[in-house]
Image (cartoon, helix red, strand yellow):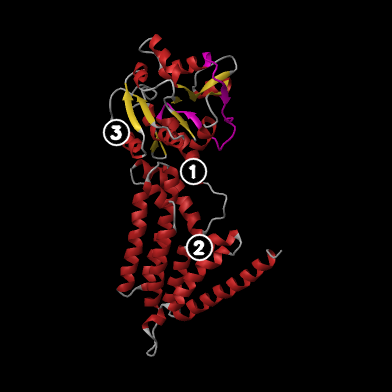
Amino acid sequence: MLEPVAGGNGPPRAFLRVGGMTVARQQLALAQTLQCERIVCLAQGMRPELIELQHAAEAAGAKFHVIGGPRSLLGLVTAADELIVLGDGLFASTRDAASLLEQGQAVLVQPIEQGLAAGFERIDLNHAAAGAMRIPGRLVEQIAELAPECDAASALQRLALQAGVRQRPIPSADNAQVFWTLLSSEEQAHALEPLWVRQRTGTDTPLGPSQAIALLAVRQFGPALLHAGSGAGHVAIGAALLAAIGLGTGWLGSASLGLALCAFGWILRQCAVLLTRIDGRARPTGRALGSDLAYGLLLDIVLVVLSGWGVASVPWQHAGERFFPAFMLVALLRIVPRIMPGRWTAWLEDRALLATGLATAVASGAGGELIHAAAVVAAVAGIALSGLASRLTRP
């Protein structure tokens, strides 16, 4: 983390941001994926970004060291260790880099034309470095014989190749799904960002309306939110607040407005899930935000309560009976998607779509009848689909 950004002004290029995450944090995510026990950063003194990196590493159970030169590695690496070396400014997909480095000791390389054009170091006539390697720790001892101001990564790479460590090629740059870049300027980071966001938010499964809206919003505004520090956690809090405000609005007598607020809350929740994928930093909240289960269950309860408050009551009706049709509808919509074809699952699980439908039914004045009818349709569909599924799977 010594090389400055292009032009020499500004912080080290290890702290360039792509999708709100620094290059250094992406490298730390790779190190954690490879289960590294010790993180060593070459840097000129502590910076706030390094302190943040230290906290993240130690929270994951790794030891963290900052050293000013390569000779300081002599007291940190033993001959029995293996060393993962990541080049200054290397921004690579965690999945692709981990799969290559998990295969064993190697110096990662790429075709010379591809590597030189991207700013990587030449190795020989046909290959350029790829900015990452996995080498035996015993090679570090030879750094004592080199000049104190030598480039650590370049020196270790040369020592590894001289010791016979094999070369392993990285995927071709023609593959749009592979990110393997040596960032050196803000312009490069900004140019990479849209492609990075699209990859992190891509999915092969059909999307429901809320997921499609959230995807468009996150791809448009997500990087700006992450750069500003308003990450997935802030958006998730907003989603929870909308659900709470919706419940309060229904209590005050406007159930349809409360249901509409819940619909917006569900879309915000989907945005939070997508932002977590872009951010990609290893932390407990990321795992919690990646699941809709808890928020979905709580929102279902709010939808049932608001629907019960919104339907007209009759004198002989028990108070609990007002909530029963909405409860049955929501319960069936949790069961039926499990036996439905995949392309319809996202629609049936879309709580913004359900909240909008309930709000429309309540606002029409015939909420009770319409919710009853919807629950009956869901029940009939579940019975029909379960029968079809049993016939298709019968031996």
Could you classify mark 1 by the number of other residues whose Cα lies within 10 Å: few (under 14), some (14-19), or many (20 or more)? Answer: some
Q: Quadrant of the C terminus?
A: bottom right
- Horizontal side, residue 340 vs residue 240: left or right: right
Could you classify mark 2 by the number of other residues whose Cα lies within 10 Å: few (under 14), some (14-19), or many (20 or more)? Answer: some
Please tell me whether mark 1 or mark 3 is closer to you in this view. Answer: 3
Could you classify mark 3 by the number of other residues whose Cα lies within 10 Å: few (under 14), some (14-19), or many (20 or more)? Answer: few
> Residue 377, percent across and down?
56, 75
The mark found on residue 200 in the picture is 1
Mark 1 to mark 3 CA distance (whole Å): 26 Å
Q: Let me know if residue 375 is in the magenta part.
A: no
Q: Earlier in the sequence, mark 1 or mark 2?
A: 1
Q: Quadrant of the N terminus?
A: top left
Q: Earlier in the sequence, mark 1 or mark 3?
A: 3
Mark 1 to mark 2 CA distance (whole Å): 22 Å
Q: Earlier in the sequence, mark 3 or mark 2?
A: 3
Foreground pick, 165 / 231: 165
- Determine which quarter of the picture holds residue 305: bottom left
Query: Is residue 146 visible to the viewer in this orientation of the structure?
Result: no
Residue range highlighted in magenta: 161-185
Q: What's the amino acid at mark 1?
A: Arg
> Residue 274, percent across and down?
45, 49
> Residue 163, percent across and down?
52, 15
Q: Which residue is mark 3?
A: 51
The mark found on residue 57 in the picture is none
Q: Secondary structure at mark 3?
A: helix
Q: Secondary structure at mark 1?
A: helix
> Residue 162, percent across and down?
52, 13
